[in-house]
Amino acid sequence: MTVEIQQIHDQILAAIDAHDSDTLRAALSDLHAADIAEVIDLLDDEQRSELLYALPPRTMAEVVVMLDEAVRGEVVDDLEEEQISQLVTEMEPDDAADIVAELSIEQYGEILDKIPQEQSDEITELLNYDESSAGGIMTPRLVSLHAGATVAEAADAVRDFAADEDVHYVYVVDDHDRLVGVVPLRSLVINRATTELGNICETDPISVHVDDDQEDVLHTIRKYDIAAAPVLNNEGILVGRVTHDDVMDVAAEEAAEDIYRMAGTDAAELETHSSFRAASVRMRWLMPCIFGTLLAGGMMAMFEQSSLAGSQLAALIIFVPMIAATSGNAGIQTSTIVLRGFATGELAASKWDIVFNREARIAVLLGVLCAFCSGLLAFLLLTGLKSMNFRIASDASVAPLAMGAAVCIGMLGAIAESVFLGIVLPFFFRRRGVDPAIASGPLITSANDLLSVTLYLSIAWMILH
């Protein structure tokens, strides 16, 4: 927390603790909504309520939109229906739909009955779309005119509309509201007032479909560097627009989800402040680790029954953590690179053959270098232990050179296996329609623990048998 925010927090908290409404309103009046939202994260429920009651409805709406999802849900739960109605009325339709979607069915109906009919219809329409689709993040409010409208008429429409909304384009539609083209605002400035929009519009504009995933919309706007993308339905009718600030929120949300999954938890943790809820979310991801390492331990127990001498197996087990950790990290590095390519929407990153050829070459180099280093270190360690008569290496069956070779080849195989998983799993989950980010973290680590240990001990058994 910056010094400035700390000062704002202390000032607001002092006014709240003094129960001085006038001082609190005065302190809040000169603050930006983003600063107020950051301070709210630090307050308890009672303090939040007192702060929100001191805000005018418009500012309250701006603040609530900026809150983290978990905090926003708690704030809305503490508000009375009249306040929620005022809040929703002041919000843009897409933000209002997000709030209404979190309400109970009874609240949902009562709130929509209390707000203007036009806004109620907009919210109801938005709630019909999946929240992570273009339709779920778009705003239905835009400026659209027919091709025969003039630049002067378009400027008047923008002037009336822009009082409450940002405008980037004027959309040109036909008699059935199908998109014909777009007119950037600069074209309204450089063309004569009598010029018809049909003569200056950019035809075949970049657009998105109402059912497109929000991540695809993000890639489209980023790739073509446009300020907003028109949203069309199956008939090509213009139903809304997604602006650059909408996709900034999407980018932050998608990045947070990927980071959570790669860290071994879930995006659902973003939606709660409950320690029990967060623990239950994380536990679901830790269970594969428990079972994976249990199976790896069982595999080592099975090799104890093999023809390997007890001292040989004990010496080999020394290097299990090194091989499992090194190969696991190599796999996570690979899966992270693949996931980054998916996230940026790069075409080359979505091609299996291109990714495999690149990562396979890297894996060979990494595998050879790590194998040589680990084999040499294993040989030197066992030789040293043997010379010092350590019990684990004193047995005649423990041959440093042969075991160094087993560690070397085992490391090479384990890295090859882990990198292969790091490539295959993200593509597999993506093809199945599952977020490929789950291929990183606990899943790939658990699978690698089992496979790398099995592969290493199998190679050692073949060399030492």
Image (cartoon, grey):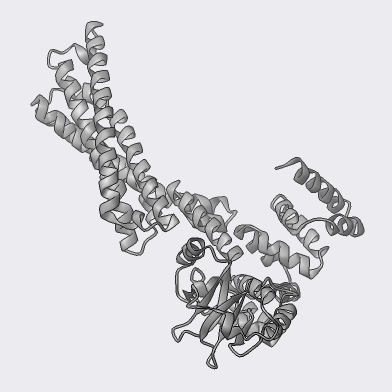
Q: Is residue 440 visible?
A: no
Q: For the point 84% across and 56% down, which residue is it?
A: 30
Looking at the rendered image, the quarter that the C terminus falls into is: top left
At which x and y percent is residue 397?
A: 12, 16
In this view, the residue farthest toward the bottom is 175
Q: For the point 27% across and 28% down, which residue is it?
A: 369
Q: Decide if residue 32 is on the left or right side of residue 154.
A: right
Q: 244 or 307, which is in the foreground?
A: 244
At which x and y percent is residue 198?
A: 57, 85
Quarter of the image for residue 304 reads: top left
Quarter of the image for residue 182 reads: bottom right
Residue 238 vs 356, above or below: the answer is below
Q: 361 or 328, which is in the foreground?
A: 361
Q: 173 or 260, which is in the foreground?
A: 173
At which x and y percent is residue 68?
A: 62, 57
Looking at the rendered image, the quarter that the N terminus falls into is: top right
Q: Decide if residue 83 is on the left or right side of residue 453.
A: right
Q: Is residue 256 visible?
A: yes
In this view, the residue farthest toward the top is 388
Q: For the point 53% across and 58% down, which residue is it?
A: 251
Q: Decide if residue 366 is on the left or right side of residue 274.
A: left
Residue 206 vs 287, above or below: the answer is below
Q: 144 or 155, which is in the foreground?
A: 155
Q: For the point 64% across and 88% down, which residue is it?
A: 149
Q: Decide if residue 31 is on the left or right side of residue 206.
A: right
At which x and y percent is residue 344?
A: 44, 55
**Labels in figure, total:** 0
Quarter of the image for residue 403 reads: top left
